[in-house]
Image: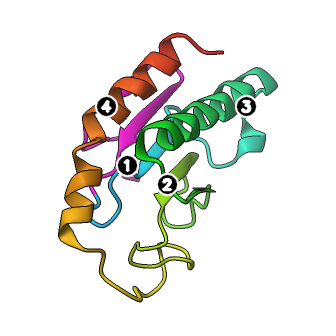
């Protein structure tokens, strides 16, 4: 069976033998990240305790980078996997002016964020990627 997370179509900003971190190409949500466990497992409970800690630390580092660089009003962290049963976490910068706020990004949009605002946020993506890599190379 084909798995889009096993066969990443996008170059990760970080990858090691255990996990990958990608920036999701979502025009309405600059800075939307996924932390993906490289091996095809479905649930956190499939991981050894040391691997679970590695994964949750990576999610934590991505959240810190999003907060520091993107300055969102809120961060959403979710692990669903209903459509793609491969362990991964969504880490999403949320703003009061985003298309769905305060609802989840998977619901019906209630507004459109102004393009200049989105462009300002997109301009931060290289700095965000650099910050994530820096944090992953020197974990606290």
* Residue 10 drawn at (x, y percent): 25, 41
* Residue 50 drawn at (x, y percent): 76, 21
Whole-number angstrom distance, CA of label 4 to CA of label 2: 15 Å
Instruction: Give the mark toward the camera: 2 or 1.
Output: 2
Instruction: Give the mark toward the camera: 1 or 4.
Output: 4
Residue 41 or 116: which is nearer the viewer?
A: 116
As drawn, the label of residue 72 is 2
Above or below, comparing residue 46 to residue 96 in the picture? above
- Residue on which disc 1 sits: 31
Above or below, comparing residue 119 to residue 96 in the picture? above
- Residue in the image at 69% along x and 48% along y: 43
Instruction: Give the mark toward the camera: 3 or 2.
Output: 2
- Residue on which disc 4 sits: 127
Instruction: Give the mark toward the camera: 1 or 3.
Output: 1
The first of marks 4 and 2 along the sequence is 2
Whole-number angstrom distance, CA of label 3 to CA of label 2: 27 Å
As drawn, the label of residue 52 is 3
Classify residue 40 as left or right of residue 42. left
- Residue in the image at 73% along x and 39% along y: 46
- Is 18 magenta? The answer is yes
The first of marks 1 and 3 along the sequence is 1
- Residue in the image at 58% along x and 30% along y: 61
Residue 20 or 138: which is nearer the viewer?
A: 138
Q: Can residue 116 be seen by looking at this rendering?
A: yes
Classify residue 115 as left or right of residue 57. left
């Amino acid at each position: 069976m084909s798995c889009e997370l096993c066969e990443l179509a996008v170059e990760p900003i970080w990858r090691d033998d255990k996990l990958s971190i990608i920036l999701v190409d979502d025009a309405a949500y600059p800075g939307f990240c996924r932390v993906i466990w490289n091996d095809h497992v479905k649930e956190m409970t499939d991981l050894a305790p040391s691997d679970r800690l590695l994964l949750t630390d990576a999610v934590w580092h991505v959240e810190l980078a999003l907060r520091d660089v993107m300055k969102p009003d809120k961060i959403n962290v979710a692990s669903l996997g209903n459509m793609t049963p491969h362990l991964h976490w969504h880490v999403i910068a949320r703003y009061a002016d985003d298309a769905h706020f305060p609802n989840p990004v998977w619901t019906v949009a209630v507004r459109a964020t102004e393009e200049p605002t989105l462009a300002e946020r997109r301009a931060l993506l290289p700095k965000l990627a650099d910050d994530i890599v820096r944090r992953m190379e020197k974990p606290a």
